[in-house]
Image (tube, grey):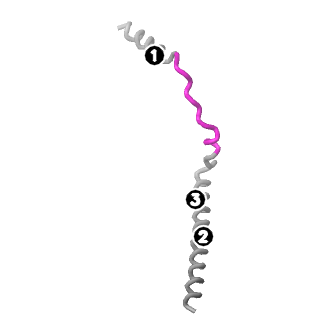
Amino acid sequence: MKTIPALLCLFALAACSNKPPAPESDPKAATAQPAAPWDAMKQDEQRAKDVQKIVDKQAADQNKQIEQQTQ
């Protein structure tokens, strides 16, 4: 019975030795993420507003073209 804990310790020490260190994450990737959860939501909201502006402009241009063709 006393050999089982000794063997477990031996296996644990053998498993931890001669391993290369774990690679660190890319520091640039860590800075690319927003600082707070709501920052991501604000970025998404701004992106949606920008897309809506583009769609509205295209719709206005299309309406002008339609009006010019019907005159």
Q: Distance between the residues labelled 2 and 1?
A: 61 Å
Furthest toward the top, the residue is 2
Nearest to the eye among marks 2 and 3: give it: 2
Q: Is tag 2's residue or tag 3's residue first in the polypeptide sequence?
A: 3
At horizontal 59% and vertical 35% (from top left) the residue drawn is 25
Q: Toward which corner of the image does residue 50 lie, by quadrant? A: bottom right
Q: What residue type is labelled 1?
A: Ala
Q: Toward which corner of the image does residue 59 lie, by quadrant? A: bottom right
Nearest to the eye among marks 2 and 1: give it: 2
Q: Distance between the residues labelled 3 and 1?
A: 48 Å
Q: How crowded is mark 3: few (under 14 residues within 10 Å), some or many (20 or more)?
A: few
Q: What residue type is labelled 2?
A: Ile
Q: Is tag 2's residue or tag 1's residue first in the polypeptide sequence?
A: 1
Q: Give the range drawn in magenta.
A: 18-31
Q: Are marks 2 and 1 in contact (CB under 8 Å)?
A: no
What secondary structure is found at the residue carrying circle 1?
A: helix
At horizontal 64% and vertical 41% (from top left) the residue drawn is 28
Mark 3, residue position: 44
The foreground one among 63 and 9 is 63
What secondary structure is found at the residue carrying circle 3?
A: helix
Taking the magenta stretch, the answer to whether it contains residue 30 is yes
Mark 1, residue position: 12
What secondary structure is found at the residue carrying circle 2?
A: helix
Mark 2, residue position: 54
Q: Which amino acid does label 3 sit on?
A: Asp
